[in-house]
């Protein structure tokens, strides 16, 4: 998290105010441009386009990152993970 420059306050804001998408057995939470609450509007650029990935069966944080258009990116993401095929 520190390597990507995303602090704990931003993660908490995404979890509290963001939209959730359930795909690939995980929960993808994001704050788009329309989801930033009024009290965070001064730091709007800091919060928009932040994605937090959590495991689907528990509330374990897997990773977080920034994406230019998270709603479109997550909508196009496949429903299931595609694994590598085993060699025969």
Image (cartoon, rainbow, N blue to C red):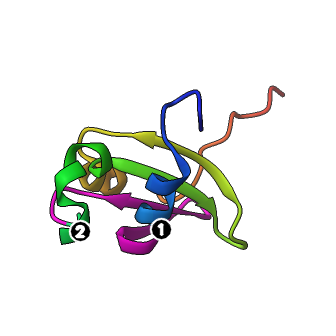
Q: Nearer the viewer, residue 88 or 47?
A: 47
Label 1's element? helix
Instruction: Give the class, few, some or many, for how many residues have Cα within 10 Å of label 1's Cα (few <14, many ≥20).
Output: some
- Check residue 18 for magenta coloring: yes
Judge whether 74 appears above or below 14 on screen.
above
Judge whether 16 appears above or below 29 on screen.
below
Label 2's element? helix
Q: Nearer the viewer, residue 71 or 79?
A: 71
Residue 37 appears in the rendering: no
Judge whether 76 appears above or below 17 on screen.
above
Query: Of the numbered discs in the image, which one, if any, rests on residue 76?
Result: none
Q: Quadrant of the N terminus?
A: top right
First-in-chain label (2 vs 1): 1
**Residue at image x 79%, y 32%?**
86
Q: CA distance from mark 2 to mark 1?
A: 16 Å
- Label pair 2/1, CB-CB below 8 angstroms: no
Nearer the observer: mark 2 or 1; the answer is 2
Residue 53 appears in the rendering: yes
Instruction: Give the class, few, some or many, for how many residues have Cα within 10 Å of label 2's Cα (few <14, many ≥20).
Output: few
**Residue at image x 36%, y 72%?**
17
Question: Whole-percent x and y of residue 71?
Answer: 27, 56
Question: Whole-percent x and y of residue 47?
Answer: 31, 50
**Residue at image x 42%, y 51%?**
51
Judge from the rendering whether residue 19 lies leftward or rightward of residue 59; answer left or right: left
Question: Whole-percent x and y of residue 58?
Answer: 72, 72
- Magenta stretch, residue numbers: 16-34
**Residue at image x 84%, y 28%?**
88
Q: Nearer the viewer, residue 39 or 31?
A: 39
In the rendered image, the residue lying farthest to the right is 88
Residue with the mark numbered 1: 15
Residue with the mark numbered 2: 39
Judge from the rendering whether residue 82 lies leftward or rightward of residue 6; answer left or right: right
């Amino acid at each position: 998290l520190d390597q990507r420059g995303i602090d704990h306050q931003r993660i908490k804001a995404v979890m509290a105010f963001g939209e959730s998408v359930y795909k690939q057995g995980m929960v993808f939470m994001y704050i788009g441009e329309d989801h930033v609450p009024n009290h965070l509007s001064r730091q709007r650029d800091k919060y928009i386009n932040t994605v937090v990935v959590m495991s689907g069966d528990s509330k374990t944080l897997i990773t977080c990152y920034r994406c230019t258009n998270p709603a479109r990116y997550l909508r196009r993401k496949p429903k299931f993970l595609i694994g590598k095929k085993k060699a025969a």
